[in-house]
Amino acid sequence: MITCDFSKRKNQTLSQYLYSQIKEQILMGQLIPNQRLPSKRSLADHLGISVITVQGAYQNLIDEGFIYSIEKSGFFVEDIHQPGKKNKEEKIKKQSVKKTQKNIIGDFTQNAIGYEKFPFKTWAKVSKQVLQKYNYELLAPGPSSGNLILRQTIADYLKNYRNMNVDSSQIVIGAGSELLYNFIVLMLGSNKIYGVENPGYKKTQKIFSTLGAECIPIDIDENGMSCSKLEMSCAQVIHITPSHHFPTGIVMPVKRRFELLSWAAQKKDRYIIEDDYDSEFRFSGKPLEPMFNSDLNSRVIYLNTFSKTLSPAFRISYMVLPEKLVEVFKNKFEFYSCTVSAVEQLTVAEFIKQEYFSKHINRMRNYYRSLRNNLITNIRNSQLKNRITIKEENSGLHFLMIVKTTKSVKQIKNEIQKSRLKINLLDDYYFGKPPENENAFVINYSGIREQDISKIINAFQKIF
């Protein structure tokens, strides 16, 4: 049985220290290749810690290739010193798959947009105006929270389109949401326990863990993050996507939103990170207002990005802080330089102010609606029509496709690898072992082309 002295962990979380101790024992040869490790529950009982702590350590070891898991068999030490026959076979297989997938006809795993849809001429015109108009602002050092002109513009935009009354001082600009998560953890503390949705976007969990925070998955139900599961956890900060949950597509109802706000208000160190993912692309009904608007206790941090509305390549995101955190941010990060160039910030500001942004959103919403309808219509008219169910397709740029098939998950994944498609199962987004789900596939359709839909349907029919 694995043992470790937690009294020596210093500033590390229990999960981090357990991970480091198992890793060291593997590197030292104390745990040999293919040796079976204790189950999560038995190791947790032996060490007097939670199963979630062991799960976090094991998951990090799996991600880094120190251990591997076999379904219904357990966890085993990876042979990291000698490749062996198995690894060579896998390498050959991966090379073969890589060759097969050079000409991908449908990638449903990426948040891509069609480059032909970007308004390059308008963007070039606005960029030229910025270079002519803002001489001083382009060369002067800007505050850590971002250019004031862009922050004021975003505040106006949020007022007009999201009914949010915020001051520019509450807005922070950053080069991507990942950086903003860094700021949040440094503000709130890496000693807090952060809860993320399960299933959910695993990159968020990895960012929190990399920053030294303990991060735990909290199950969702049909309305979003489960309040009962949340109450049973030790989470102090939660990350949620209420406007359109990824990957299930659930839109969180008002009742659940108020329940989570009530949870946050019960203790002074609790916060909610509201990721307003895909909120601009809702195809039926009126969009629900952000939870930020209903927060009377300054516990919600609002995040959004221009990655889906403009392009992932821009790396421009922003967060809106509750008023009581504005001074905290200023005191901690005043010496930082903003990570987005002044030219890009001012170009985005002018693009929004001159109404090009709202026109672009409307144009893209119509385009994505047509693309989604075309794809779904072709699926429902295909040979698979009696074996496929589409769920949560009216909000955001992805939906779930549930397939009735006699093929096993392993067989389906092999078929996908041989095809010219890239698709993830819903199971791929669970932390730890997923429940016994139907064969649900996450169809992130924003990057496909209409002219490829018939080829995609043919590939679906061969896979399923």
Image: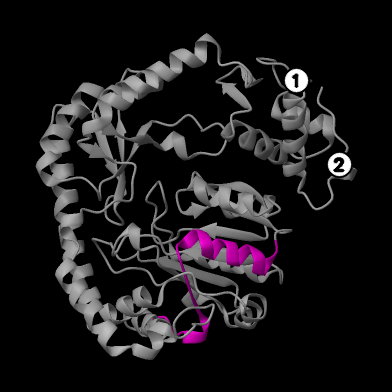
Q: Position of residue 461 (x, y in %)?
A: 19, 25
Q: Position of residue 398 (x, y in %)?
A: 30, 49
Q: What scheme was used to colour the molecule? A: one colour
Considering only order in the chain, which callout, 2 or 1, is on the residue closer to the N terminus?
Answer: 2
Placement of the N terminus among the 4 image quadrants: top right
Name which residue type carries label 2.
Answer: Phe
User: Element at badge 1?
Assistant: loop
Q: Which mark is residue 31?
A: 1
The residue where tag 2 is placed is: 6
Q: Is residue 85 above or below residue 205?
A: above
User: Element at badge 2?
Assistant: helix
Left or right: 67 in relation to 410 = right
Q: Residue at x 49, y 82 (%)?
A: 142
Q: Residue at x 14, y 39 (%)?
A: 453
Q: Residues within 10 Å of mark 1 (few under 14, many from 20)?
A: some
Left or right: 286 in relation to 55 = left
In front of the other: 126 or 261: 126
Q: Position of residue 321 (x, y in %)?
A: 54, 76
Q: Residue at x 57, y 35 (%)?
A: 63
Q: Is residue 190 visible?
A: yes
Name which residue type carries label 1.
Answer: Leu
Q: Which residues are magenta?
A: 163-189
Q: Position of residue 54 (x, y in %)?
A: 71, 36
Q: Is residue 149 visible?
A: no
Q: Residue at x 65, y 14 (%)?
A: 34
Q: Is residue 362 above or below residue 450?
A: below
Q: Which mark is residue 287?
A: none
Q: Residues within 10 Å of mark 2 (few under 14, many from 20)?
A: some
Q: Is residue 168 magenta-colored?
A: yes
Q: Circles 1 and 2: CB distance less than 8 Å?
A: no
Placement of the C terminus among the 4 image quadrants: top left
Tag nearer the camera, 1 or 2:
1
